[in-house]
Image (tube, grey):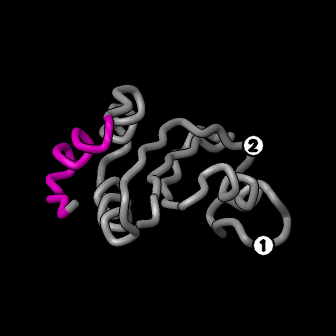
């Protein structure tokens, strides 16, 4: 099974961006690079700082978790970054059932 991760990065202006990837380090390089592979939202908002990362598991579950985090308020996202919950706690916070 592929191991997908949820990650949050902080932009130069302090905004939090949420994404999922199999290889977070590679994805951050893509976001920073100029080859157009990074998220459009992050263009010209770097440098970025990885503030949170959690191994989630399947792509389907990672996408559900990403959507759940994106629905959180800025304050709740900041609390999440500060708490750095492990996978199971993160799923509880977001009220997502894991099948694995």
What stretch of residues is rendered in magenta?
A: 86-99
- Left or right: 5 as drawn, with respect to 56: right
91 part of magenta stretch? yes
Which structural element holds mark 1?
loop
For mark 2, what is the residue? 47
| In the foreground, 75 or 30 | 30
Please identify the quarter of the rendering in which residue 67 is found.
Answer: bottom left
- Left or right: 20 as drawn, with respect to 89: right
Residue found 57% across the figure and 45% down from its top: 9
Residue at the far top in the pictured view: 82
- Whether 17 is drawn above or below 75: the answer is below
- Whether 82 is drawn above or below 76: the answer is above
Disc 1 and disc 2 in contact, CB within 8 angstroms: no
Residue at the far front in the pictured view: 1
67 part of magenta stretch? no
Residue found 38% across the figure and 31% down from its top: 84
- Left or right: 89 as drawn, with respect to 23: left
For mark 1, what is the residue? 36
**Circle 2 Cα neighbour tier, 10 Å, few/some/many (<14 / 14–19 / ≥20):** some
Quarter of the image for the C terminus: give it.
bottom left
Quarter of the image for the N terminus: give it.
bottom left
Please identify the quarter of the rendering in which residue 37 is found.
Answer: bottom right
How far from the left and from the top, in percent, is residue 22? Answer: 54, 61
Residue found 69% across the figure and 66% down from its top: 38
Which structural element holds mark 2?
loop
How far from the left and from the top, in percent, is residue 71? Answer: 30, 58
Lower position in the chain sequence, tag 1 or tag 2 = 1
Distance between the Cα atoms at labels 1 and 2? 16 Å
How far from the left and from the top, in percent, is residue 57? Answer: 37, 58
Please identify the quarter of the rendering in which residue 40 is found.
Answer: bottom right
């Amino acid at each position: 099974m592929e191991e997908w991760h949820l990650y949050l990065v902080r932009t130069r202006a302090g905004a939090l961006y949420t994404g999922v990837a199999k290889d977070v380090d590679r994805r951050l390089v893509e976001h920073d690079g100029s080859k157009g592979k990074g998220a459009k939202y992050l263009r010209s908002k770097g440098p970025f700082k990885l503030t949170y990362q959690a191994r989630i598991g399947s792509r389907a579950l990672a996408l559900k978790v990403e959507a759940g985090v994106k629905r959180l308020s800025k304050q709740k996202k900041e609390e999440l970054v500060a708490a750095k919950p492990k996978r199971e706690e993160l799923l509880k916070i977001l009220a997502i059932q894991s099948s694995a």
